[in-house]
Image (cartoon, coloured by chain):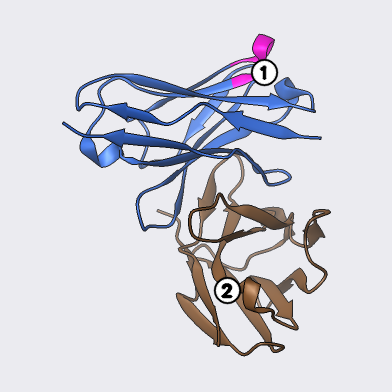
Amino acid sequence: QTVVTQEPSLIVSPGGTVTLTCASSTGAVTSDYYPNWFQQKPGQAPRTLIYSGSNKHSWTPARFSGSLLGGKAALRLSGVQPEDEADYYCLLYFGGAQNWVFGGGTKLTVL
Amino acid sequence: EVQLVQSGAEVKKPGESLKISCKGSGYSFATYWIGWVRQMPGKGLEWMGIIYPGDSDTRYSPSFQGQVIISADKSISTAYLQWSSLKASDTAMYYCARPDRGYWGQGTLVTVSS
């Protein structure tokens, strides 16, 4: 069973920078995994921030960026705002069987 | 504008059947894979499976194979998730999503309780 691993929790100060990562049990994450990043706040549906690794939606704040970093997918937040406190999930694609797998999520606290 | 609009909340008893829906608009529904996601109370997101409405090619995540049925009717741009016999452990929020661009439905809350 494929496992996708994220940091369970991270703390960042307002105005700071933080990087969330997303690793695969099968090895290095590449662009072929089409990493997606979602933000979810309590009581709300997930909202996509990044798709296919680094692509942003029109609603994605400029302070969010996606990349590949050291064999993992990464989500970088620069100039963190209090409203960025949320759960963040990554989603990776594992090919032929159209199999997608979520990471366990990272709870980001802005303190 | 791409939209995925899901059917409303459901309250069911154990053993009952259920079919929830997800209607796509603003794009060619038949030509994009659409998936279903479970989120149990207080827990993370789980990928359940995915369907290509153009030919109904369907793939299930191992944990959900045999537990649910995913289907689609491209003539009305709607995907479905169904259960034949609900359990209390099926209580969750269910989302449909297009993973290619990360479009999401608003979610359907399913509550199974005697």
| Residue type at tag 2 | Glu
Image colour for chain A is: brown
Mark 2 = which residue? A85
Q: Is residue A23 left or right of residue B28?
A: left
Q: Do tag 1 and tag 2 residues touch (Cβ < 8 Å)?
A: no
Could you tell whether B68 is left or right of B15 in the image?
right
Residue visible at 78% across and 74% down? Answer: A63
Residue A108's spot in the image, x, y percent? 54, 76
Q: Distance between the residues labelled 1 and 2?
A: 35 Å
Q: Classify A33 as above or below A20.
A: above
| Tag shown at residue B77 | 1
Label 1: chain letter = B
| Mark 1 element type | loop
Boundaries of the magenta span: B73-78
Query: Crowding at label 1, few (<14), some or many (≥20) Cα neighbours within 10 Å?
Result: some
Name the amino acid type tagged 1. Answer: Ser
Q: Is residue A65 above or below residue B74?
A: below
Residue A78 in the image: state x and y as whole percent. Answer: 75, 81
Residue at figure coordinates x 71%, y 54% from the top left: A32
